[in-house]
Image (tube, helix red, strand yellow):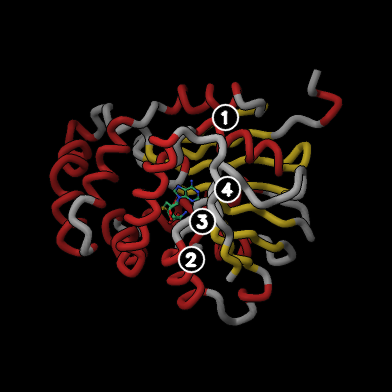
Amino acid sequence: MVKRECNSATGASTHAEHGERVAAMFGRIAGWYDFLNHALSGCQDIYWRYRLAKAARPKPGETVLDLAAGTMDVSVELLRQYPECRVAALDFALPMLETGRDRKLKNGREEKIYPVQADGRNLPLPDECMGAATIAFGIRNILPREDAYKEFYRVLKPGARLCILEFGTGSKRVWKGLYNFYLDTLLPFIGDRISGDPGAYRYLAETIKTFPDERALAQEMVDAGFERVYHVPMMSGIVYLHVGEKPHAFDQD
Ligand SMILES: C[S@@+](CC[C@H](N)C(=O)[O-])C[C@H]1O[C@@H](n2cnc3c(N)ncnc32)[C@H](O)[C@@H]1O
């Protein structure tokens, strides 16, 4: 496992503090994270990550960036779908990466998935080295998001895809308000009791409720320079898959 210093020269101090709080929070819930993901989504998260990886479409031999990789479920799914690729699994919460490494990096996966502790706003990667990039349930946590988009754009090869999996805004009523009740009441209640971090799943619910809707997120991708941007709703728009491409050099004028 490679450890990198988080050096966010671009973030204001409030963003840096936010980052430290988020990293510490995910560090505390790392052990329960996978179980709660599956339990709280009724195992739908497995399908969502399958769709995310399917959209990435790297070429054989290329490396895929899985940012905010956490316990590396997306990284593992990418390798399953693209066995001829490698995955750079970057996250700034070391306990999340360590939990994923101990549980999942075996049977040869450890040869092809490289966990690295790093901040998504300041990637320790050269320009145009990645054949695709994914981020599942991570972009919501990064402030400012523009810094992450800029870094995705910089490290992707021309023509490569950025694929984002994220909750839709929780401010819309879904399933006649049942989902909103779940978000406001059940999710924090269950999360608090199991995760060992009262507050972590309240934070999750809050960030979902205040997150921009799918159109605003698509616009952010366009503003960051991505083209052929589209989004696909899943589970009545509770979750969205967003896809965009870095333009080829001849498209960029
Ligand atoms: C909800 S988890 C998602 C983990 C994984 N992608 C998944 O699908 O389960 C969000 C992850 O984003 C990471 N994260 C948040 N902000 C980050 C940043 N600025 N740079 C790198 N990782 C970040 C957290 O440490 C956490 O592991």
Number of the front mark, 4 or 2? 2
Give whichever of 207, 22 is nearer the camera.
22
Helix, strand or loop at mark 4? strand
Residue furthest to the right? 250
Q: Which three-letter amino acid code belongs to the residue tagged 1?
A: Tyr
Residue linked to disc 4: 134
Q: Which three-letter amino acid code belongs to the residue tagged 4?
A: Thr
Number of the front mark, 4 or 1? 4
Residue linked to disc 2: 97
Quadrant of the image for the C terminus? top right
Q: Disc 3 beta carbon < 8 A from ligand 1?
A: yes
Residues at circles 4 and 2 in contact by the CB criterion of under 8 Å: no
Q: Earlier in the sequence, mark 2 or mark 1?
A: 2
Residues at circles 2 and 3 in contact by the CB criterion of under 8 Å: yes
Number of the front mark, 2 or 1? 2
Number of the front mark, 3 or 1? 3
Residue linked to disc 1: 230
The relative height of residue 84 versus residue 212 in the rendered view (above or below) is below
Q: In the rendered structure, find residue 91 and report the number of the disc placed on it.
A: 3
Give whichever of 236, 18 is nearer the camera.
18
Helix, strand or loop at mark 1? strand
> In the displayed structure, does residue 95 sit left or right of residue 219?
left
Give how far apart the Cα atoms at labels 2 and 1 are: 30 Å
Structural crowding at the residue carrying mark 3, measured as other residues with C-alpha within 10 Å and reported as few (<14), some (14–19) or many (≥20): many
> In the displayed structure, does residue 20 sit left or right of residue 191?
right
Give how far apart the Cα atoms at labels 2 and 3 are: 7 Å
Q: Which three-letter amino acid code belongs to the residue tagged 3?
A: Asp
Q: Earlier in the sequence, mark 3 or mark 1?
A: 3
